[in-house]
Amino acid sequence: MSRSMPEGSRTDWLATERTDLATTRILDVAEQLFVEHGVSAVTMRGLAKAVGCSRATLYRYYAGKAELLAAYVDRAATDLGASVAAAVGDESDPGDRLVAAVATAVAGVRSNPALSAWFVADSAGRSTSLALVSPAIEQLTVGFLTEILPTADLDDLRERARWLVRVIVSLLTGPAASELEERALVQRFVVPVILGSN
């Protein structure tokens, strides 16, 4: 004897699954195009063609290029956040955790051809803007700072998080001579500010 399902429930899960598959496919193809052509050269028309759908279909998922880029940044930030969490897991000293987190984030972006394409001269301004307004980046950065500054209030943590994101973007757009030098700069100039009195 089969159970009857409420009207509409048979396909509701399919709609969500199809949307997830479509957005994943679109972002995967966009990532490939970022590597091949650079972020600023990717257009919605070109992306639709590469994905194999109409522009109307693409706009069903992303209202425009700004929304597409924001979604990509959020997805990449979430993946990068997992790498940062793994890298700082064994560090007990808050300053050492902060240096390791910044170094891991910077190295993660640099080692990923799609992400590093965001920090070339013609894309750096847009990348900085997106990084500063990305909910995923803010959530990850504030969450990390909450671990090392448990007594700070949320507004203070958000300000520190925005400043930390600016530091990371600065290192990506204007790298120091070596990773060792960048770590030393973060230790000397960033750690005291981030961990200073709250």
Image (spheres, rainbow, N blue to C red):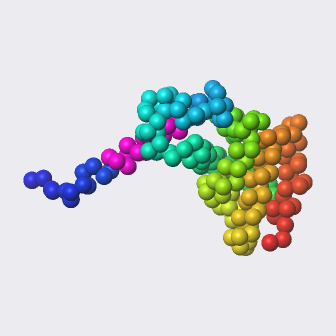
Estimate the x, y position of residue 59 in percent, counting from the top left: 47, 42
Above/below status of 174 relative to 84: above
Residue at the limit of the structure toward the left, as seen here? 1
Q: Is residue 64 left or right of residue 107?
A: left
Q: Position of residue 18 (x, y in %)?
A: 37, 43
Q: Looking at the image, which residue is at 65% across and 35% down? A: 39
Quarter holding residue 146: bottom right
Instruction: Give how far across and how far down residue 157 sits, in percent.
Output: 72, 66
The quadrant of the image that shows the C terminus is bottom right
The boundaries of the magenta stretch are: 14-29
Q: Horizontal placement of 72 versus 19: left or right?
A: right
Q: How many marks?
A: 0
The image quadrant of residue 151 is bottom right
Name the residue located 43 percent from the left edge and 32 percent from the top edge: 53
Residue 86 sits above or below residue 120 on the image: below
Residue placed at 24% from the left, 51% from the top?
10
Residue 140 seen in the figure = no
Tell me what residue is drawn at x 75 percent, y 64 percent.
159
Whether residue 157 appears in this view of the structure is: yes
Position of residue 99 in the picture relative to residue 184 (left or right): left
Secondary structure mainly formed by the magenta segment: helix
x, y percentage for residue 2? 12, 53
Q: Quadrant of residue 108?
A: top right
Q: Is residue 24 magenta?
A: yes
Residue 94 belongs to the span the image colors magenta:
no
As drawn, the residue found furthest toward the top would be: 36
Task: Return the residue nearer the eye: 163 or 52.
Answer: 52
